[in-house]
């Protein structure tokens, strides 16, 4: 699979503070890549560099096949950016906001209006398109913001915390729009404070801490890095529960609930091995549930910090 973004040895410092310290990233075309990290980890700085808004101190960077240092204009022509804060002009209607963006892209009067109407329909904003954007709900503004990013038909979209402040319904609506974009071949580079969002959307995740990447992989791969996974076995008979405790001596028992928790990494191989032991002992299991660590557990394990929803401060980016 071709790379949409390829980064080698990315460094960035502000004075004595090293914000990015030798970052390597590879994002495949037509996928969702999520960059996670505590406040001040450097996520926003990474997005600003990759989108040509900030200059790196060192590193080889290719975006959409273009060398970012040698041909930043070609990179800009291939990307769209939706930042943490809405770029919507509240004194314009939704349609006028899109037409303004079309004018900035020099699409021409007729093509610009056609593109605006196309995006209003795609983002379910046709009726709202004639209303001032200041009257929109938070979810509608974010949808319009994303639509404005797409006016120039970018191949790669940077979404910097796109659902911060949205209610759960609006957040899920944005997730669906993002999935639909990727289904058309668009690549999405996502930063988010919501680990559930990364878990739901991302094909690959990288965790940034103190300017360094401390973990990378698919969500399920990262979860297997963290201890604490187990298989929960529930029994209806105290006799079966007692027998199972003898067959599975490493299990943690809960006698009152007739439940055993068997340490397990959740992989198919280890699950098959456990099922074989249960079958060999002819154990009558009423219910079997697989429990694996979630991304919150991964985040805490690799950064030593709990997750937070606070925005990154400009001074620490």
Image (cartoon, rainbow, N blue to C red):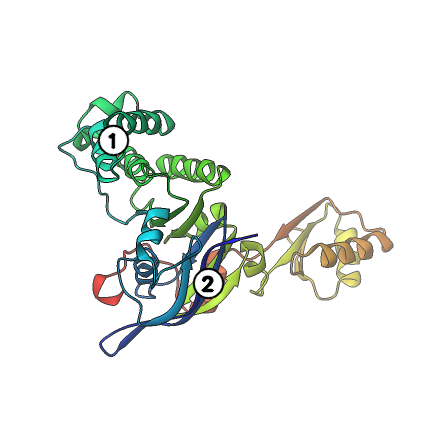
Other-residue count near label 1 (Cα within 10 Å), few / some / many at <14 / 14–19 / ≥20: few
Q: Position of residue 139 (x, y in %)?
A: 30, 35
Residue bearing mark 2: 25
Q: Nearer the viewer, residue 264 or 55?
A: 55
Are circles 1 and 2 on residues that touch, CB within 8 Å?
no
Q: Nearer the viewer, residue 264 or 38?
A: 38
Callout 1 secondary element: loop
Q: Residue at x 69, y 62 (%)?
A: 251
Q: Residue at x 37, y 52 (%)?
A: 192
Q: Position of residue 204 (x, y in %)?
A: 51, 55
In primary-sequence order, the first of circles 1 and 2 is 2
The quarter of the image holding the C terminus is bottom left
Callout 2 secondary element: strand
What label sits on residue 310 in the rendered view? none
Q: Position of residue 298 (x, y in %)?
A: 49, 62
Would you say residue 209 is visible in this rendering? no
Residue bearing mark 1: 108
In the rendered image, the vertical position of residue 180 relative to residue 256, given as above or below: above
Q: Nearer the viewer, residue 24 or 6?
A: 6
**Image quadrant of residue 16?**
bottom left
In the rendered image, the vertical position of residue 126 relative to residue 195, given as above or below: above
């Amino acid at each position: 699979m071709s790379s949409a973004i390829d980064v080698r040895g990315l460094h960035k410092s502000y004075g004595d503070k090293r914000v990015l310290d030798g970052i390597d990233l590879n994002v495949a075309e037509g996928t969702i890549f999520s960059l996670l990290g505590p406040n001040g980890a450097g996520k926003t700085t990474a997005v600003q560099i990759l989108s040509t808004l900030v200059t790196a101190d060192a590193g080889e960077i290719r975006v959409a096949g273009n060398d970012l240092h040698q041909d930043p204009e070609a990179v800009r022509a291939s990307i769209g950016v939706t930042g943490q804060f809405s770029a919507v002009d509240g004194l314009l209607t939704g349609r006028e906001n899109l037409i303004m963006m079309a004018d900035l892209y020099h699409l021409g009067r007729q093509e610009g209006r056609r593109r605006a109407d196309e995006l209003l329909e795609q983002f379910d904003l046709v009726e709202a398109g004639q209303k001032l954007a200041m009257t929109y709900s938070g979810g509608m503004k974010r949808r319009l913001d994303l639509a404005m990013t797409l006016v120039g038909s970018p191949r790669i979209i940077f979404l910097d915390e796109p659902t911060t402040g949205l209610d759960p319904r609006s957040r899920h609506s944005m997730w669906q729009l993002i999935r639909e974009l990727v289904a058309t071949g668009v690549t999405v580079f996502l930063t988010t404070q919501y680990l559930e969002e990364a878990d739901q959307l991302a094909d690959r995740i990288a965790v940034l801490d103190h300017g360094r990447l401390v973990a990378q992989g698919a969500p399920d791969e990262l979860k297997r890095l963290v201890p604490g996974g187990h298989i929960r076995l529930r029994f209806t008979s105290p006799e079966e529960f007692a027998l199972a405790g003898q067959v599975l001596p490493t299990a943690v028992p809960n006698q009152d609930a007739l439940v055993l928790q068997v340490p397990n990494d959740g992989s198919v191989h280890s699950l098959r091995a456990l099922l074989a032991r249960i079958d060999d002992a002819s154990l009558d299991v009423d219910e079997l549930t697989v429990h694996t660590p979630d991304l919150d557990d991964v985040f805490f394990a690799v950064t030593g910090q709990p997750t937070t929803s606070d925005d990154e401060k400009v001074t620490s980016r």
